[in-house]
Image: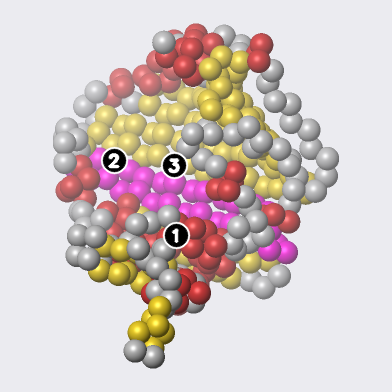
Amino acid sequence: SLHDALPILIEGRTLVPVRFIAESLELKVGWDAETRTVIILDKSFIMERLEKEAPELLELLNTDSSAVLTEEATISGIGNIKYINSVEKSSNTNLKVNIDGKMKQNESAISADLTIKTTGSGLLYNEIKKINREKVTLNIIFDKNNLKEYIKSTLLEEKVGSKWLAMDLGKNISNAELSSNISIEDLINQIIDSLELTTNTYYEINEYIDFICELFGSKHLTVTGRNTRTYTYEITAEELMNMFGKTESDLIEGMDDVDTISAKLKVTMKVEDNVMTSSDVVIEGTIVSNHETTNFDLKLNSKVTSKNKKVSITIPTAKEVVSVDEISE
């Protein structure tokens, strides 16, 4: 086999296994049994393409999150929904959603505590009041050491009361995937090394890179500033659909009476000393269907308030927890 073959001497020439030579040059080697072909892949072409076609993305991804072991941040947001029905005016609705919260991180855990309050008028708001959902709380804790997530929310009280809902994520992710010290190049190499190469692998990888470079290239992701770097990402629903070879007609197909949908996303991230310090997300859109129009917008902000100071996060005890398996039985 490619693995076990040893160098041999034939007619004065030394023949060395291709895998030995290729892997010594840090190339990925595989065997396509169907076509009986040895595949040699130079992984460096991936980084070369990203450096050329999506340099802003690489720069952003290489911010040094490992430099911050502990941090605290505030989370805030405002959302609006305005529904207008020119025929059934009694169903018109104005909703305003306020989001306030905090995020904490230390060496062993990450937590987020959110409060979501809804005010307004109209049919939809009255329905929210009926089920006592004008104020919703959401608490999330992720235990890095044990790869478990805990969720507590007023939305879950009917099923779990005041306890935490626990989910074991260890089956889906590994500590290696959580490592903040791994570089983008190392991560790409890990992914490629896990693949079984075929004669189509190179072309398939290039298709993925085409999509990534189009999605996060300079057209949509820009950067300004020197000491403080500001990254701005903007894209519309129409542009995103076009990347998948779809049109607005494909998007609204199957949606009764919907005439048009428009939406756009803008994300702004600030990085100081190679560490992200704040981010803003803005989503806006309009849905028009016959005599109905719905306008919506959401603005979210997170801002780091302290770094590398003592941060305490309490992991729920066994008595405070209900597992997902228990409530699904």
Identify residue for label 2: 287
Q: Is residue 51 left or right of residue 312?
A: left
Q: Is residue 315 left or right of residue 10?
A: right
Disc number for residue 297 = 3
Q: Main secondary structure of the magenta part?
A: strand
Task: Find the distance from the CA under tag 3 to the CA under tag 2.
Answer: 12 Å
Pointer 1 or 2: first along the chain: 1
Q: Residues within 10 Å of mark 1 (few under 14, many from 20)?
A: some
Three-letter code for the amino acid on which mark 1 is drawn: Asp
Residue furthest out toward the bottom: 12
Identify residue for label 1: 193
Region rendered in magenta = 259-288
Task: Find the distance from the CA under tag 1 to the CA under tag 3.
Answer: 42 Å
The quarter of the image holding the C terminus is top left
Task: Find the distance from the CA under tag 1 to the CA under tag 2.
Answer: 45 Å
Residue visible at 73% across and 52% down?
68
Among the 4 quarters of the image, the one containing residue 243: bottom left
Pointer 1 or 3: first along the chain: 1
Three-letter code for the amino acid on which mark 2 is drawn: Ile
Q: Is residue 18 left or right of residue 275?
A: left
Among the 4 quarters of the image, the one containing residue 141: top right
